[in-house]
Image: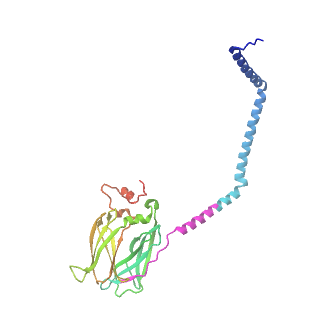
Amino acid sequence: MWYTLPSMADSFLKEVEQEDLRFYKISKFWIENKETLKRIGLGIFMAFDAILMTWVLWSLLDGFVISAPAESRAVSEVAAYNQRELHAYTLAHRAQSMDPSAATLVSAGEGKYDFYATLENPNADWWAEVTYVFSWTGGESEPETTFILPGEAKPLVAFGAESTSPPRGVNTILTNVVWHRVDHHMTGEYASWAEDRLDFVVTDAVLGESELDGDIGRVSFHVRNATAYNYYEPSFIIVLKRGANVVGVNRTTLSDIDSGETQEVVVNWFGTVPTASQIDVIPEINIFDVEAYKPLEGETTTDTRTRVFPGRRR
């Protein structure tokens, strides 16, 4: 039996015929059912639109009528709760108050007296500007203003208060305290930041007599600025002690001191010359005050602030 194989042309024609047949059937179906399909599509669109409008209307009705009172109460409760939380947080993190120690009275000559007390700041995240007076029966010293750094214990002093008789019942009164929170974004870890700026080395502290007048006492010492910063007008409080008792107090201020510089400091002690077994020299520099720092050559105030507070950005 003989078989005749279909040619490639016959196969191509059959595929074309089948494709035309499919297109014909689809076209015929569309022509015959076009109106029905349009109605179905319109119905689906209308149903979707109706559902959407129903959802919107229900949401508005629920939001403004049905659930509005309950939501209003919930918002009020949340606001009140947050206020309570904020108040509790503020109380927990506010600056703790400071109480000065008992005042020490030191004779500074006939009818004149120096006063000394200590003040300790228990706060690690707050420093303060402080105004204080020493008050006694029948008198009061002139107001003095100072600052106290976080965690610092520093002397409060008043010099040369006049009184016809030794003051009695002396009290140290803080008349005004202005707190400032430490911005750790600017300082980083405070202890190391402060140590880098307060590294002053005091050596050779000696109490003796003035070369000009033997009745005048003199304290001399050397101070070296071991920090990386130059300072304007650094102050030093000198406290003389005999055992644990304070027997004399004085203050001196330098015009400036540069990084790495060593200066000899001589402080004359007018009035009664005390005898002491210990000499404490306490630096007094507000490291939060950018004006305490000497700018580098060609440096602007903004540059100095950025250098002193490394977290600050221009």
Q: Position of residue 182 (x, y in %)?
A: 45, 64
Q: State the scheme by which the image is colored.
A: rainbow
287 is higher (above) or lower (below) than 113: above
Q: Residue at x 62, y 64 (%)?
A: 81
Q: Residue at x 69, y 17 (%)?
A: 12
Relative to residue 271, is residue 289 drawn left or right?
A: right
Q: Residue at x 77, y 25 (%)?
A: 29
- Residue extent of the magenta highlight: 78-105
Based on the displayed image, in which of its 4 quarters is residue 233 positioned? Answer: bottom left
Q: Position of residue 106 (x, y in %)?
A: 35, 83
Q: Is residue 186 visible?
A: yes
As drawn, the residue found furthest toward the front would be: 1
Relative to residue 280, is residue 32 drawn left or right?
A: right
Q: Nearer the viewer, residue 3 or 200?
A: 3
Q: Is residue 104 magenta?
A: yes
Q: Position of residue 17 (x, y in %)?
A: 73, 18
Q: Nearer the viewer, residue 250 or 223?
A: 223
